[in-house]
Amino acid sequence: MTKNASDIILNRLMSLHPKHIDLVLTRVWRLLDLLGNPELSLPPVIHIAGTNGKGSTQAMIRAGLEGDGCKVHAYTSPHLARFHERIRLAGELISESQLSLFLEECETANLGAPITYFEITTCAALLAMSRTAADYTLLEVGLGGRLDATNVIAKPELTIITPVSIDHTQFLGATIEKIAAEKAGIIKRGVPVIIGRQCEAALDVIEDIASQKGAPILAHNQHWRVWEERGRLIYEDEYGLRDLPLPNLIGAHQIENAGMALAALRYLEKTDKALEASVTCATWPARLQKLKSGPLVAQAGDAELWLDGGHNPAAGKALIEALSRLPRRPTYAICGMLNTKDIGGYLKYIGESVEGLYGVSIPDETASLTGAETVEAAREQSIEAIEALTVEEAISAITKQSPNARILICGSLYLAGYILRQNG
C-alpha cells in the first residue's frame, strides 16, 4: 500500500454520485447491509448534532472520557489538513494503512452503485470502529441530523443537540423551526437527550420531538446550568455544584460547550477527574487557535497569528467575544468565505473588533467568494477592507503597517485547512 493510497481511493469515491450532498439514508443502509451491519457492533454511542459547538463539545467529552481511562472512538467532519483527522480509533488518528484498507473494503462492497462521498466514508468510519476495541464512540453529525449518514444508530447511549441557528438553509429549510426539527432527528425513543442553549422556537421543536419519542430531556437552564464566576467554571445539576477551571478553549461559547460535555459525563457517572480533564485537556484545531510555528508564523514576525474556522453569524459573535478575553492588540482580519454562507451576518460581528480586513479567495475552492466580493461585503458593514491575492500578501501588508498586530485568519474551515497545510 503506497503512502498516498487513501487519497487515490478518496478521489475515486468522489465520482460515485453526481451531487456532493443528497440527504437520504437508503444508500447508507444498503452499503451497511453489504458490510455486515458494522453499526450494530460499535461501543456505546454518543451522537451529537447542532449548528455550533459540535466539534468542541465532542472534543471535551473525549478529553473527559480519556481522562477517566477510557478508550474512545471519534468521528467528525470536515477535516482540515488530512482526511485522517475525521476518524479516531481508540484515541489515535486512523493510520494510512487502516484508512486505505477500510475505504477499499467499502468501495468493493458498494460495486459502483451511486453513493455520496460523505456516505461511503462514513460507512468506512463505522466499519473501522466496529473492528477496534474501545469503550465509547462519539459521532458528530455532518449536516442536519434526520437524514445524515451518521443517523443509523438505533439505540445510542446518549444524544446531544448543541445550539441551533440558521445555516445550510438550502438543505435544512429556511426557518429555525425546520432546521431544529432536522437536527432533532437524531433523538431516539427512550434515549436521553442533552439540549444546549436554544432560542425559544428551536427549543419548543426539540422538546416536542423528544416528548413524542419518550426521550428523557436534560436541557440547559432546566436540568443543568453552567456559568463563569471569578475566573472559574461553575456547573450545577440535581447532584450539586462543581467548581472547575475555565476551558482551555477560549470564549464564553466554550463555557456553554463545556456545560453540554459535563452534562454528558455526569449522565455517564464519570469521576471528578473526568470532569476536570474535559475542560483542561481538550484540543480542537481552528477554533481560535494560536499558530506557534511554521513559515507563516515566521513571516508574521512579532505579530500574533490566530486561526478560526467559524463561518456563520453565531460563530462570528462567539469569536469576537473570545477575542475580547485576550490582551489588547491592534487586530486585523484576513477573511475568506464560501458563497453559501451569510457573509453579511458574519462580518457584522467581526467588524466590531478589527482595525481592517483583507479579503482573499480560498485556494482551490470553486464555491469560494472572491477576495473582491468579500471586500465589498465588508465595506457594506463599514469595515475598512482591501483585497489581497494571497494570505501571505495580506500578512506582509498588515505587518508592514502594524508589526505587533494580532492577525486573525477566519471565515471558513476550508481556508483554515489550507492554512494548516501551508504552515505545517
Image: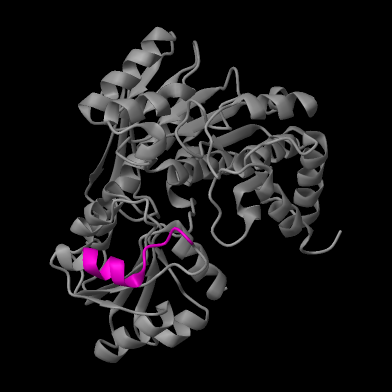
Q: Which percent across, then down, holds residue 76?
A: 55, 44
Closer to us: 338 or 322: 338
Any magenta on residue 39? no
Q: Is residue 166 at least partly visible in the picture?
A: yes
Any magenta on residue 372? yes
How many numbered discs? 0
- Name the residue rendered at 65%, 29% in the picture: 28
Q: Quadrant of residue 329?
A: bottom left
Q: Does residue 79 appear left or right of residue 3 in this picture?
A: left
Closer to us: 177 or 263: 177
- Name the residue rendered at 29%, 66% in the picture: 374
Furthest residue to the front?
A: 18
The quadrant the C terminus occupies is bottom right
Q: Does residue 327 appear left or right of residue 262 in this picture?
A: left
Q: Does residue 322 appear left or right of residue 106 in this picture?
A: left
- Name the residue rendered at 39%, 57% in the picture: 338
Closer to us: 345 or 371: 371
Furthest residue to the left?
A: 382
The quadrant the N terminus occupies is bottom right
Q: Does residue 158 appear left or right of residue 302 in this picture?
A: right
337 vs 170: above or below:
below
Q: Is residue 91 at least partly visible in the picture?
A: no
Q: Which percent across, then down, holds residue 119?
A: 63, 37
Q: Which residues are magenta?
A: 366-377
Q: Which percent across, then down, holds residue 246?
A: 34, 50
Q: Quadrant of residue 75?
A: top right
365 vs 115: above or below:
below
Q: Which percent across, then down, holds residue 346?
A: 26, 55
Q: Quadrant of residue 233?
A: top left
369 vs 103: above or below:
below
